[in-house]
Amino acid sequence: MSLLDQPQFIAHQATITARWESALEANQHDCVVIAAGANQNYFLDDQAPPFRPNPHFAQFFPDRNSEHCELIVEPGAKPRLLFYQPADFWHMPPTIPDWANNCFRVETHSTPESLTAARNTYVQGQNNVAHIGPQPAASAHNPAALIAHLDFLRSQKTPFEVAAIRQATAHSVRGHIAAKAAFFAGASEYDIYMQFLAATGNTAGELPYSSIVALNEHAGVLHYQHYDQTKPPAHLSFLIDAGASHLGYASDITRTYSSDKAPAEFAELIRLLDIEQQSLIDEIHVGQPYEAMHANMIERIASVLITCGVITCGLEQAIADQVADPFMPHGLGHLIGLQTHDVGGQQTNTAGALSPPSTRFPALRLTRPLEQNSVFTIEPGIYFIPMLLDELRGSSAPINWSLVDALTPCGGIRIEDNIWLTDEGAVNLTREAFNNPTLGQQEAAQ
C-alpha cells in the first residue's frame, strides 16, 4: 500500500494545514496562494530540466506531476487545489491522483487563463493575500515573515514525512550496495554511477541531488561533479555521496571504501571514523546544541588522526591548537526533508531570528538545538586536500607529512547517515536500511 493511501497521510495533511492556518493568522494574512511553479527552458533552447515543484506546494501535494497547479489555503476550510490538466498530444497530461479528493477541494483547468481566473475569483475580497512560489511579483509575493514562520516548522517532521524519508533511504541504500560491488569489480566512476542509479529505482531527474562518485584523489573534492568514463590505473579508494527520493522527500548517504592497494592507514582511518560517528550518534538527545556536537566530532577526528599517526602530538595539544580542523572543512550535517539541505537550520524561532555559525566553523548549515521529530544528517569526514594542508607545510604543525603524502592519492573519507530524533533518542534510518537483510547484505565498516 502506498504511503499516500494510509491514514498517516491524512493526519499529515491536517497537521500541515493547521500550521499554515496558524502562520497566516500570526502574520495577518486571510489566505495564501501556493504555486507549484513551472519549468523554464535552458537559455536559447526548447528543453528544460526535470521539474521540481515549490517545496511548500510539495508538502501538501507530493507528486511531481503538478506544473502550473496552485493551492489556496484559507483558515477554516479544506484547501482548494486548482489542478492544471491541459489538452495536449505532445506530452502526457497529468491525472489527478485518487487520494487528492480526500485532502482538497479539487477542480481541473485546461488552460492557464482558466486557472488564473478561478484563482482570482476565489481570493477576491480577501485581505492581504499571500502568494508563495516562483510566479511574478504580486502584492504579497513570498512575504519573508510568513516564509520564516513556515521554514522554522519544517524541521518538525510528521510520521508520514519520516516514513517517506525512510523509504528514500532504503532506495539509496540499494544503490550504495550496487555501487560498492561495482567499485570492487574495478568499474569506472561512470559505470559505478549507472549501477547506483539502476538499483535505486529513481530516474536521474528524481534524485534529490547530483551524486558524488569519486575514485582516488577525487574523493578530496567535497562536491566532485564528474563521472570519469576512464578507469584509473589503480582503484585505491572510493567515496560515494548519493541519495534517492520518495514522494519528493530526500535521503543523503555517504560511504567510503578502501582497496588493498591503498595504504593500510587509510582503511584504518575509515574504520575508526565509523566507530566515532556511531558513538556520537548514540549520544544525541533532544535539546543538544548542534555546534557543540560538531566541536566534539572534531576532537574525535583528532583522536583518530593521532591513533593512525597523521597527527604526531598528544590529544590535549591537538585540541588546543585545532590541528584537526583543516582535515574536516565542512559542517557535521544539515536538516533533510523536501530538500536535501532543508530550510531553517540556522533559525531559532518562527519570527526568523538566526543563530549564525561561529567563525571557527563557518560552513555549519545547522546551528539550532536538536528537536524531537527532526531529521538530519551526521557526516564527519577526514580529507587530504592539498590546498588546505599546504598552508601548514613548513610550519611547526605536528603532522606526519610523509604519511599525508602517502594518503593524499586516496582523497578523503566521509561517512553520512540520516538520523531521526525521537524523545527516546536517535534512530539511524541509514543503518536500519543497510542492516535490512532484504536489501541484500549486512553493512561492513569498509
Image (cartoon, grey):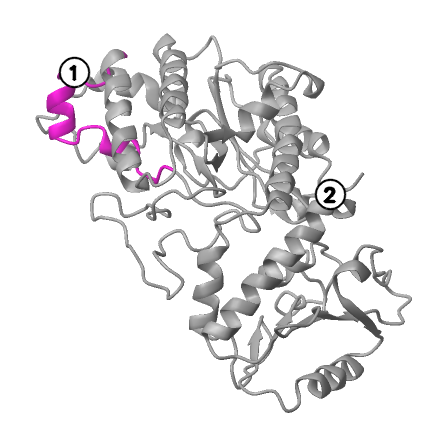
Classify residue 198 by image quadrant: top right
* Residue at x-position 32% and y-position 27%: 384
In this rendering, position of residue 70 left or right of residue 147 = right
Q: Is the stretch drawn in magenta largely helix, strand or loop?
A: loop
In the image, residue 253 lies in the stretch drawn in magenta = no
Instruction: Please state which amino acid type lies under the numbered disc 1.
Output: Thr
Q: Position of residue 350 (x, y in %)?
A: 40, 62
* Residue at x-position 34% and y-position 19%: 407
Q: Which mark is residue 3?
A: 2
Residues rendered magenta in the picture:
308-332
Q: Secondary structure under badge 1?
A: loop
| Residue neighbourhood size for the residue with mark 1, other residues' Cα within 10 Å, grouped as few (<14), some (14–19), many (≥20) | some
In the image, residue 314 lies in the stretch drawn in magenta = yes
Tell me the CA gap for discs 1 and 2.
52 Å
Q: Which mark is residue 312?
A: 1
61 relative to 70, above or below: above
